[in-house]
Amino acid sequence: MDFVEEQKIIKEFLNGSDIAFKQIVDKYSSKIYWHARGMLNNHFDADEVTQEVIIILYKKLHTFNFNSSLYTWIYQVTHRKTLNFIRKNNVKSFFSLSDGSYNGIESTVDIYNDFEKRDEVEQIEKVLQRIPTRQREVFIMKNFEEINL
Amino acid sequence: MKKNSTEDIKYLESQLSQKIKIYKEFQKLDNKERYFGNLYHNAMGKMAEKKSEKAFRFLPAVGYAVLFIISFVVLLNSLNFNDKVLLSDDLYPFSETSLWLEEEEYLSATLDDEDFNIDYVGYINNDELNYFNALSFDYEIEQLPESDINDIYVNLKNKKIL
């Protein structure tokens, strides 16, 4: 889907085509998910953020001004949503009696339970969480999303 | 301390860099299509759910507004604006009016509709002497010498009863 075709699909969606919106979601949902997952270290949180971002896309795509690529716009939405989620979690864990970890849940249910190197992935995610939020985001963008910084 | 934390981050990043390949393999598994295919429907379902929740959501501002209106109506009904305002000296049998005609009407109405015939009008229209003569005195009073009656009259006058 090139830039012109993408613009055409956005306009189709803005004219009321849900099929066009599904095309946009199909293209970007994995990028949204993996960015959120890298930042949140948790399938459930990443899933929630991804769904929230999709809902925002549906409601706010009419404000997209076509000055940048759609991915840049979606990335900004995902970035804000993820940081908000981290802040909310920090506040919740501050007032919560538990230690705020999700390890018990994520070790039993995830989208890829049958992945052979699952333990190693979990280790990677744990190490990622030890990096401060900003540095983590830069690391993810550079290494996992292969964005040139 | 800050230097240490920077070094820690660098160390963690170097550890992670060695594992990037594994994480990328994890991201590119074939079965991801199934999850991301459902994601669109899940998000749309969530949006519909939120919409229906919104319709029944209790808004505190609306609640406060309704409470305010109800209390205002109750208060309005509890006040009867037809009642006269009661002052501290309401037991005083004279009203605040300075017109004696009204005074007479007021006294007659207040004292159980008895005919309260005070000849204020005569007092105003005629001189003081006529007014004095118009009053009916008891026999004992009539027997008093004129100087005593004059004293009583002056005394009454000074007390502003007349």
Image: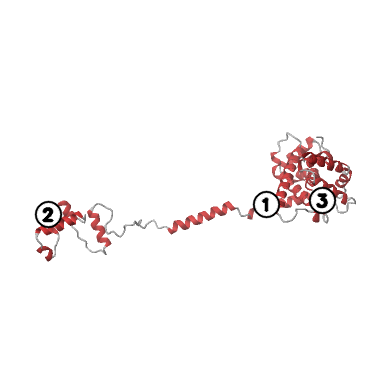
Nearest to N terminus: mark 2 or mark 1: 1
Q: To which residue does mark 1 refer?
A: B51
Label drawn at residue B129: 2
Q: Which residue is at 51% across, 54% downward?
A: B69
Mark 3 crowdedness (10 Å alpha carbons): few <14, some 14-19, many ≥20 = some
Q: Secondary structure at mark 2?
A: helix
* Position of residue B157 in the picture relative to residue B50 (left or right): left
Q: Amino acid at mark 1?
A: Lys
Q: How far is disc 2 from disc 3 in space, using C-alphas? A: 115 Å
Q: Percent position (x, y) of residue B158?
A: 19, 54
Q: Tell me what residue is drawn at x 76 percent, y 43 percent.
A: A133
Image coordinates of residue B148 in percent, x first then y, are 12, 59
Disc ID at residue B35: 3
Name which of mark 1 and mark 3 comes first in the sequence: 3
User: Label 1: how many residues lie within 10 Å, few (<14), some (14-19) or many (20+)?
Assistant: few
**Which residue of the protein is positioned furthest toward the top in this rendering?**
A67
| Mark positioned earlier in the residue sequence (2 or 3) | 3
Q: Select label 2 or label 3 by which is in front.
A: 2
Kindly identify the amino acid type of the residue bearing the numbered disc 2. Leu
Query: Residues under labels 2 and 1: Cα distance?
Result: 93 Å
Residue B59: image location, x then y, percent: 60, 53
- Chain letter of mark 1 equals B
The disc labelled 3 sits on which kind of residue? Tyr
